Amino acid sequence: MNVMRTAILLAGLTALFLGVGYAIGGPTGVVVALIFSLGMNAFSYWNSDKMVLRMHGARQVDRATSPDFYDMIARLSQNAGLPMPKIYIMDNPQPNAFATGRNPENAAVAATTGLLSSLNYDEIEGVMAHELAHIRNRDTLIMTITATIAGAISMLGNFAFFFGGRDRNSGLGPIATIAMIILAPLAAMLVQMAISRTREYSADRAGAEICGKPMALASALNRISGAAHRIENDTAEANPATAHMFIINPLSGARMDNLFSTHPATENRIAALQRIAQEFGQAATTSSSRNSQGPWSGTEPRQKGPWG
């Protein structure tokens, strides 16, 4: 169901992009928009992972520099049936993580120092299993394409708004053209957010299966969500287009489960993980795992994680 929904949303986003091209230049505009889109997607396919990691100041680590974290990722990757991804750490106090890469053979996972210092071992394991699930589901490629097309729509809309150049024979009247130029970027943003939220639910389930501890992931989401309200992520605020990549929205502001959120509500994700735990025959309560401190409401002192 999630795969079909994602395909429908991607098709709608592509149609919207071609519609903007038609509004600007008629049939010729559609061709130009298509070529432009293919060029941007080709560039993103090969370079988006490097760009995102550079934006967030991520540094690559290996078994020599971070043996425990490396071994965790290696074991989870084996559970997921994935090749070993590159591992990065971001010097950022907000607990968070993301995955990137065009395919499982060229993938990377990145975690903040805040995540490694404030969550317990099993919670970190749940978070990284979620990110590996994104890689296995090829969500990293889907979200790259989505972000690229959405960005291209906004660029075309801005170009048309400031420079004009619409083909009078395109079939759209002046009012319809103006409406398309203004509303298309907003619609693209909404579709991008809807795709992102759909993939988060799928990655939560797959991540729970990879680590075998749904409630450890639920506890991690609770802790990270509480911290995101209090601890600002400067690099994410400077690069808001990357917010959808993180396991929890790193930006300040509302986190309601609506059209304007890049992520589902944390409460809804935890409820879904509780149902998954019951399917696994586990108690749908906070994980009593190694070093566990229970859910973090955001008002309690931060606890030291296994690598704090």
Image (cartoon, grey):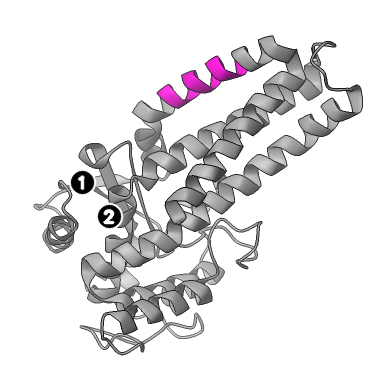
**Residue 57 against residue 209 in the figure, above or below:** above
Residue type pointed to by label 1: Pro
Q: Which residue is found at the position 83% from the left and 33% from the top?
A: 179
Whether the magenta-drawn stretch holds residue 236 is answered as: no
Q: Position of residue 173 (x, y in %)?
A: 89, 22
Q: Which residue is found at the position 37% from the left and 65% from the top?
A: 204
Q: Position of residue 57 (x, y in %)?
A: 38, 44
Residue 85 tag number: 1
Residue assigned mark 2: 132
The one of 162 and 281 positioned closer to us in this rendering? 281
Question: Mainly helix, strand or loop, the magenta region?
Answer: helix
**Residue 64 against residue 294 in the figure, above or below:** above
CA separation in Å, label 1 and label 2: 9 Å
Residue type pointed to by label 2: Leu
Is residue 16 left or right of 140 when viewed as pictured? right
**Residue 232 against residue 171 in the figure, above or below:** below
**Residue 79 against residue 226 in the figure, above or below:** above
Q: Position of residue 280 (x, y in %)?
A: 26, 80
Which stretch is magenta?
Answer: 32-42
Could you tell me if the residues under marks 1 and 2 are in contact, i.e. CB atoms within 8 Å? yes
Q: Which residue is found at the position 53% from the left and 60% from the top?
A: 263
- Name which quarter of the figure residue 71 lies in: bottom left
Is residue 264 left or right of 90 when viewed as pictured? right
Q: Assess disc 2: are there few (<14), some (14-19) or many (≥20) residues with their C-alpha within 10 Å of its C-alpha.
A: many
